[in-house]
Image (tube, rainbow, N blue to C red):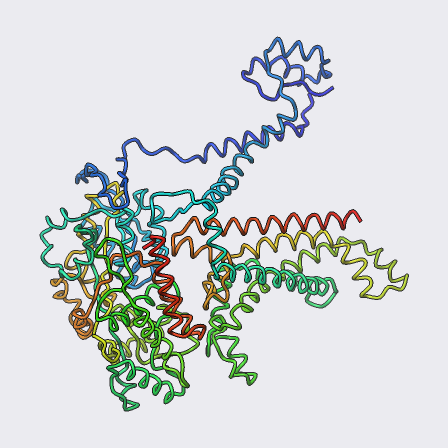
Amino acid sequence: MNKKRTRREFMRWSALAIGGTLAACAPTPPSPTAAPPTLPTAPTAVPTAVPPTVVPTTAPPVTLSFWNMPFVTQEVSANYVKQWQTAEAQALPNVKVDPFYGPGDYGPLRTKYLLQANSGTPDVVEGLLEDIAVYVKQGLVEPLDDRFNAWADKSQFVQATVSPLTINGKLYAIPYNTNARGMVYRKDVLAQYGLSVPATWDDLLKTAQTITQKSNKQMFGFYVCTLVGDPRAPQEFISWYFQVSGGKDMFDTSSGTPTLVATADQLEQVLTLYHDLFTGNPSACDPNQRGTGWPVEDPGYAAGKWAMAPMGPWLWGRRSESDTAKDILTNKTVITQLPIPQGGTHSTYLEVKPIAMNSASKYKDAAWQLMEFICSKDEMGMWDADSGGIPARTDSLTIDAFKGDIAFWVQGFGALLSQGVPISVVNWGPVNTANMQAVNYVVYGQKSPKDAATWLIDQIHGMEKAKTL
Amino acid sequence: MRETCPTFMKTRERCAVGRADFLRGQPPMSADHTSQLRKRLRVPVIRESRQGALLLLPALIIMAVFTVYPLLDGLWMALTDQNLLRKTIDFIGLNNFARMLSDNVFWLSLEHSIELTSLVVLFQFALGLVLAWAMSQNLPGMTLFKSIIMASWVIPVAATVTMFKFMAQPDIGFINIVLKALGFSNLNRYWLGDLTFAFPFIMLLHLWRNVPFYGIAFLAAMQAIPKTYYEAAEIDGANAWARFRYITLPGIRNMITVMVTIHVLWTFNNFDFVWLATGGGPVNVTDVLPTYIYRQSWSNYDLGYAASMGTVMLVILMIYFVVYMRVLEGQARS
């Protein structure tokens, strides 16, 4: 018998092997016992009610997915995450949370949520206030009015933090963290050079330039985020804008369609500030830091590279980075309001960080249990104390974690909440990109503030026309 | 006479007769006998050409699913106003392409893409040749050098960019430390944030990664050239440059074709270096088409417009490929 394999035989068996491998790798059909998710039929339509999937205590644990930025980027410490996981397992024995907390930074988190939320994962998502507006337009988050109103803890929440999450009369997320953008400064440095705390934009420029000069550029006086795509940069931009506009948003949404109300003069005034911060010899801000964002701003301040910076309470979480950072943050930093222009008002960006439920989640009751846990008095308090945030619940501030070193920090930023202005319900993604592009034109000397403001207005009008807002 | 055992059989019994004969080493059956056997067994006749096609079918399916379908879907998307924030998708014809004509950032990105590709491939080719020539010499330590030179290719792109970003930092970056030591502290800057130097720095990243790859590839091709050619040329009085020009270069022509072709495609399509290093900034000076397309897709969610720019990239590369191949074929014939 001729045992020699022919080429034809080899090809035949190879084809069968490849076909078999492909068949084996085909996705398995969904389990017939899983409840099918209900998808919204229109962008603003209320999702059809799905019979709630009750998690009986005798049932095997439900695994939920909870995406959030702080757990991944270590805005909270690794120790706190472990503590949170333990507490969650004890509080909700039938709810297991996937230790994969999402892609991390808010940009990728938002993009991936938009793409895959209809699959039901994640069940619970944390994000930025501006993300919620986009999710609501796509019908990707569940209205929570009934659940929130039935919750015994409802009255503990600061109404000013709940209101921005109420869109078209429905509550779409629960706030867990809030802050108003202020300014941190090194009291030791100002004292060393005999400088007073700047109250106006002109004072800010002079004070910052003096610090840069007297320290021989070893420390720059100020820092602002200018990176296109950075989440912090447009928040700082809008803070300056609120001071110029008297606390009014860039857009009027009263008619349901966002309409730009910011004027070229107002935007030019803001862009002139950015221009002035990077010009002059010496300049208030380091020209080599043009085009950078929060990953440079926060550690830079904690390392003593700049004396003043627009900031929120999260910086507290950096004190564990080094002895220098701990010393600067606990002993040498003072919190104050942002300087304002001549004729401006003390208004600033109010950040409200929400926790929302995926409208396609297969386990909405369990997801709500998880949200109640995350936003409970102790858990919200400990999360915010670890990261330096301000809880959205009044009773959370009474826990022991807020006594001690952090007390001055929380009081300092808490005092600014009254100046906070929440942003309107608009698709801020392309607007923020355009805002920061205009800033870059100005700080790199490509356009004058006037031309950059005109360009910005044209860009936003284009977005209005394309109905992408 | 070819084997007559059918390739595809429905039941083992149908095969039994033919296979029994085949395994017993019987001489191939006559055509008549084969035909009668097929009729008796009711086995379909599959021509060899169809057998080949059937064998290729799994690979074709994979290509269709992962290459052809996304390509066609992208081409369709380019003709619509598809936006991630809108549920409705309308056919808008060539409006996206018309919009491109007045988009300054698109033209800037296209210009940068062509500039980056041309310069990077040219420098990679030249430096790769020099490197290959150097490695072909019997210098001390060359064996060790050959083994470590591909490290730049092996290191992940993200790690490479992180490393270079550190090196480019003002004051504390390696580049600025060296410049300061050499007395050029006035050049201290953040190289990736500088309007003049950001683009050349991106080119440097490409060169650092790919020149060793060129060098190794050209070296392998050089080593395949028979030494007798060089000996004969030396006897005929050819100098080093003449030997390089008339023996080495023609000898590695095929490798040059392959390397230039794939690197033009790779560099034109390259996204990761620019995105990780600068994001296309500062102020679009390093923006290339892939990064601009990415921003249109995932910052503005304008998938239709992004797909139209992707289509333009596809057309450009196809034209390049066809023209380049025709030129090479013409040269090869002559």
Q: Point out residue A332 in the picture as x, y percentages from the top left corner.
A: 26, 81
Query: Closer to the camera, A466 or A193?
Result: A466
Q: Residue at x 42, y 70 (%)?
A: A441
Q: Point out residue A187 in the picture as x, y percentages from the top left corner.
A: 26, 84
Rendered position, A349 above or below A138: below
Residue A398 location, quadrant: bottom left
Q: Could you tell whether B157 is left or right of B29 in the image?
A: left
Rendered position, A30 above or below B115: above
Q: Point out residue A18 in the picture as x, y percentages from the top left corner.
A: 54, 33
In the picture, the quarter occupied by the N terminus of chain A is top right
Query: Closer to the camera, B216 or B129?
Result: B129
Q: Residue at x 45, y 68 (%)?
A: B283
How many marks can you see?
0
Query: Closer to the camera, A254 or B215?
Result: A254
**Residue at the right extreme of this rendering:** B236
Rendered position, A275 above or below B102: below
**Residue at the bottom extreme of this rendering:** A194
Tell me if I can see residue A60 in this picture.
yes
Q: Could you tell whether B298 is left or right of B332 in the image?
A: left
Q: Residue at x 48, y 58 (%)?
A: B102
Query: Closer to the camera, A317 or A143?
Result: A143
Q: Point out residue B59 in the picture as x, y percentages from the top left corner.
A: 56, 36
Tell me if I can see residue A227 in this picture.
no
